[in-house]
């Protein structure tokens, strides 16, 4: 990770702490270039993006608002697509960076709470659910590999 991206990640971590204190919840992730934080708000079912300037989040932009079913954890892939856990709907919504729904990945259980990319190529999506942990394959590697030693389902 280059020093600029590392610095942005540190700033984002600090800003995320402020958002958590304000009640936004732990539903946030950075774009692959480290310039755009995405924040999901469970209560309103909204996802917002921001611009980082110094230690401030500026230029809030509504990415999308889901009409139904709460949202939970979210992650970005290397193309800046957003993967969003749709709790009680039992899906992972895949959105373009502009918020257009690309597809929804159906899950066996109905309460996904968070997700992480992993596996040897970063394309396995590990999904944490209230009932059981599952994983699915994605088309592109995630921005960050959380479980690089796991091979995922066959």
Image (cartoon, rainbow, N blue to C red):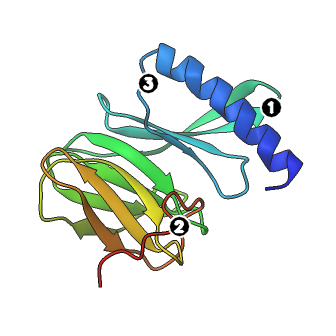
Spatial CA span between label 3 and label 2: 29 Å
Residue at the spot 23% in from the left edge and 59% down from the top edge: 91
Observer-nearest of 102 and 113: 113
Q: Position of residue 74 (x, y in %)?
A: 42, 48
Left or right? Give the position of 78 relative to 137: right
Q: Which residue is mark 2?
A: 148
Q: Nearer the viewer, mark 3 or mark 2?
A: 2
Mark 2 and mark 1 in contact? Answer it, CB < 8 Å. no
Secondary structure beneath label 2:
loop
Spatial CA span between label 1 and label 3: 20 Å
Left or right? Give the position of 58 relative to 143: right
Q: Earlier in the sequence, mark 1 or mark 3?
A: 3
Residue 82, compared with residue 129, is above or below; it is below
Q: Position of residue 98 (x, y in %)?
A: 53, 57
Q: Position of residue 25 (x, y in %)?
A: 41, 27
Q: Which residue is mark 3?
A: 24
Query: Badge 1, how many Cα within 10 Å: few under 14, some, many 20+?
Result: few
Query: Badge 3, how many Cα within 10 Å: few under 14, some, many 20+?
Result: some
Spatial CA span between label 2 and label 1: 32 Å
Task: Say which quarter of the image contains residue 94.
Answer: bottom left
| Quarter in which the N terminus is drawn | bottom right
Q: Residue furthest right?
A: 3
Q: Position of residue 46 (x, y in %)?
A: 38, 38
| Quarter in which the C terminus is drawn | bottom left
Q: Which residue is mark 1?
A: 53
Q: Residue furthest bottom?
A: 154
Secondary structure beneath label 1:
strand
Residue at the spot 30% in from the left edge and 46% down from the top edge: 66
């Amino acid at each position: 990770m280059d020093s600029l991206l590392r610095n942005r990640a540190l700033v984002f971590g600090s800003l995320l702490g402020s958002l958590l204190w304000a009640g936004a919840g732990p539903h946030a992730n950075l774009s692959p270039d480290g310039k755009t934080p995405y924040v999901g708000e469970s209560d309103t079912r909204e996802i917002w993006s921001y611009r980082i300037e110094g230690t401030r989040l500026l230029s809030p932009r509504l990415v999308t608002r889901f009409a139904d079913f709460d949202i939970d954890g979210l992650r970005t892939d290397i193309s800046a697509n957003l993967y969003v856990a749709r709790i009680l709907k039992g899906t992972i919504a895949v959105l373009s960076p502009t918020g257009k729904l690309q597809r929804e990945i159906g899950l066996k259980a109905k309460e996904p709470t968070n997700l992480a990319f992993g596996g040897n190529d970063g394309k396995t999506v590990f999904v944490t659910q209230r009932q059981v942990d599952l994983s699915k394959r994605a088309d592109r590697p995630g921005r960050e590999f959380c479980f690089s030693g796991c091979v995922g389902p066959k």
